[in-house]
Structures are given as structure tokens and as C-alpha cells.
Image (cartoon, helix red, strand yellow):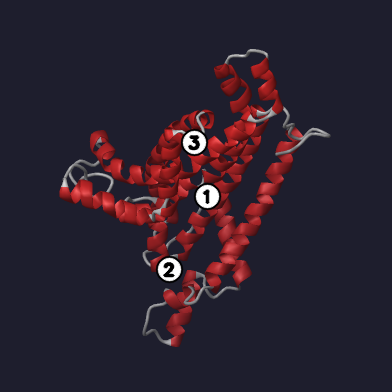
């Protein structure tokens, strides 16, 4: 187990290093890179060179990367070009706001989807299963921004039951009750998207497990059906679900850009769109790296959960399987 953890940690560091190099190179290779975007128009050639030197944009690209990497390893994410504000000062508050929105949607969808998928696997093609299939089709097919606009039109503009957008009302910032009201519409949009996948994965995974020989043997021995499903079946059915959950972990912080923009939610997804339009490459770089870290962490946690859920998965042992 220790050998496996060390090996995965080293692999993660290598992947992070490669991602940072590729991202840094792509950002600086984009049309209208930092040198063109952030130099004041109308400057003389000498003044332009001086400004580029002050911004560190006249150095060779490898040296710029090494400077960024050294600062990153010390917790310094850099500064914005236009206002020279610390990137962390802009980024970290939006991470918290996104986690409130995405975490609520994610947990709500899991609490609904997994029990519902398990139930539908025991009542395949019944009315509940048909309803779940319809919701899944709608969730996959309907654009999130369009669904969000429909909810705003109905519940905020016509019925005036819920706030139209933002995280708090102007005069109620920090109040839990007002926050909950502002969460209803965006959480509804995001939960539908999560449900579309989770219900189908839970149902399909359970159906495959319930057709296995050891399940038929347990039933033939007279084991209670609830025990067959939850003790013998669910544990094995959770493995593909854990995979999907692990891959979705970065969404909790990176956010859903379209939903956050539709509802004017001050999160990381909206920040990414705003910074892309403003071409604030230092902020985009930080968001990309944070998301990459979460992808790696999500996969790492999923691997550990495999071993806890299924004893047949032996991490780091000779002859075993590393998920």
C-alpha cells in the first residue's frame, strides 16, 4: 500500500509538471499574447521595451516559466497584468462560492440518484424507471443555460417567487436564508445535469451485479432480498459509480461556467470566462492548475475507495490489481 501511494504521488507530480508546461506554452502562444495585450497603446518603442521589461515579458519563455514555477511552489500565483492585483486575492474567494453552489448540487444529486438507481434496478422498466429515463434524457439533451433562463423567466420574473440571480441581495449579504433562496434555481439546473448521469450509472451498475452467479446463489440460500441488494450487490456496484464521482470532483471547484454566468454567481467558472475575455493569462493559468490538481486528487481518492469497497482490489501488492 505504501509503495503504491509513493508511486502514485510521484506520477502525480510528473503529470502536474507536464500540465503546467503545456498550459504555460499554450497561453503564451495564443494570438495576441501578453506582450501585445498588456502594453499600453501609443507607446514609443523604447517605452514599450521598458514596460515589457517591468512585466517580465522580454525574457525567454523558459525563464518566464521557471519564475512562475518558483513563485507557485511558494504559494505565489502571480499578479494580474492590468491592475497588478495578486491572483490569489481574486481566485480564492470564487473557489469558496463555487464550492457552495456545486457542493450543494452534487450532494443533493447523489442522495437522490444512488437510492433511485438501486430501486430502479429491482423494478426495471417500471414507472419509476421510465420516469428516471425521461429525466436522464432531458438532463443530457437540454442546454443548461437554456434551462436556467426558463427557470428565471418562470419563477423569478413571472411568479416572483425566487431571486433572479446573484448570491445574495445587496442589503442581505452573509444571511443564510437569503443565500438559500438564491441557491434554489442554479442548484435545480445543476442537479438535473448530475442526476442525468448518476441515476443511469447506478441503475446499470446494479443490474449487471444482480445478474451475477453469486447473487443467484445468495437468493437460492434464502438470504433476505434487502441483504442481497445492499450487502452483496451494492458494494460491487459502487465501483463504476466511484469512478464517475472521482472524475466529477474537479467540477466542485472549477464550477459550471455557463450556469454561473446565467445566474451571475460569483464563482470560479464565471471568473474563468471573464478572465479569458480580458486575457488575464496569469489568472487563467492559476485556474487551470487548480483544476488539474483536483483531477489528480479525484482519481487518487477513487483508487483508494476501490480498495475499501472491493477487497479484491489490492493496491500495491504483488499479483494484485491497482485500480
- The C terminus lies in quadrant: top right
Q: Position of residue 118 (x, y in %)?
A: 52, 30
- The N terminus lies in quadrant: top right
What residue is pinned by disc 3? 125
Question: Measured along the vertical axis of the image, is residue 158 above or below residue 108?
Answer: below
Badge 2: how crowded within 10 Å, few (<14), some, or many (20+)? many
Badge 3: how crowded within 10 Å, few (<14), some, or many (20+)? few
**Which sits earlier in the primary sequence, circle 2 or circle 3?**
3
Identify the residue at image location x=63%, y=22%: 232
Q: Is residue 287 visible?
A: yes
Task: Mark 1 and mark 3 in contact? Answer it, CB < 8 Å.
Answer: no
Helix, strand, or loop for circle 3?
A: loop
Helix, strand, or loop for circle 2?
A: loop
Q: CA distance from mark 1 to mark 3?
A: 53 Å
Tell me where residue 36 sits by quadrant: bottom left
Q: Is residue 305 visible?
A: no
What residue is pinned by disc 1? 75
Question: Measured along the vertical axis of the image, is residue 131 above or below residue 255?
Answer: above
Q: Is residue 78 left or right of residue 238?
A: left
Question: Measured along the vertical axis of the image, is residue 289 above or below residue 59?
Answer: above
Helix, strand, or loop for circle 1?
A: loop
Amino acid at each position: 500500500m505504501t509503495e503504491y501511494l509513493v508511486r502514485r504521488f510521484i506520477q502525480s507530480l510528473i503529470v502536474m509538471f507536464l500540465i503546467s508546461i503545456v498550459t504555460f506554452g499554450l497561453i503564451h502562444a495564443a494570438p495576441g499574447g501578453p506582450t501585445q495585450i498588456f502594453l499600453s497603446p501609443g507607446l514609443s518603442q523604447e517605452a514599450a521595451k521598458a514596460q515589457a521589461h517591468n512585466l517580465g515579458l522580454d525574457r525567454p519563455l523558459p525563464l518566464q516559466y521557471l519564475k512562475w514555477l518558483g513563485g507557485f511552489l511558494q504559494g505565489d500565483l502571480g499578479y494580474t497584468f492590468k491592475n497588478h492585483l495578486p491572483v490569489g486575492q481574486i481566485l480564492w474567494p470564487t473557489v469558496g462560492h463555487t464550492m457552495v453552489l456545486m457542493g450543494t448540487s452534487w450532494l443533493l444529486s447523489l442522495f437522490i440518484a444512488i437510492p433511485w438507481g438501486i430501486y430502479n434496478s429491482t423494478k426495471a422498466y417500471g414507472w419509476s424507471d421510465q420516469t428516471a429515463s425521461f429525466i436522464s434524457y432531458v438532463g443530457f439533451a437540454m442546454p443548461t443555460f437554456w434551462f436556467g433562463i426558463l427557470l428565471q423567466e418562470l419563477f423569478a420574473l413571472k411568479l416572483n417567487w425566487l431571486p433572479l440571480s446573484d448570491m445574495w441581495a445587496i442589503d442581505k449579504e452573509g444571511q443564510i436564508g437569503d443565500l438559500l433562496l438564491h441557491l434554489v434555481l442554479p442548484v435545480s439546473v445543476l442537479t438535473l445535469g448530475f442526476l442525468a448521469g448518476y441515476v443511469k450509472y447506478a441503475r446499470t451498475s446494479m443490474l449487471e451485479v444482480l445478474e451475477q452467479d453469486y447473487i443467484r446463489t445468495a437468493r437460492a440460500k434464502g438470504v433476505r432480498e434487502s441483504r442481497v441488494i445492499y450487502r452483496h450487490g451494492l458494494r460491487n456496484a459502487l465501483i463504476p459509480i466511484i469512478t464517475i464521482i472521482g472524475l466529477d470532483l474537479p467540477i466542485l471547484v472549477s464550477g459550471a461556467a455557463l450556469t454561473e454566468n446565467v445566474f451571475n454567481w460569483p464563482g470560479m467558472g464565471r471568473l474563468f470566462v471573464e478572465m479569458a475575455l480580458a486575457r488575464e493569462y496569469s489568472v487563467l493559468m492559476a485556474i487551470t492548475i487548480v483544476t488539474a490538481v483536483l483531477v489528480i486528487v479525484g482519481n487518487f481518492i477513487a483508487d483508494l475507495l476501490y480498495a475499501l469497497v472491493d477487497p479484491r482490489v489490492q493496491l500495491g501488492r504483488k499479483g494484485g490489481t491497482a485500480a
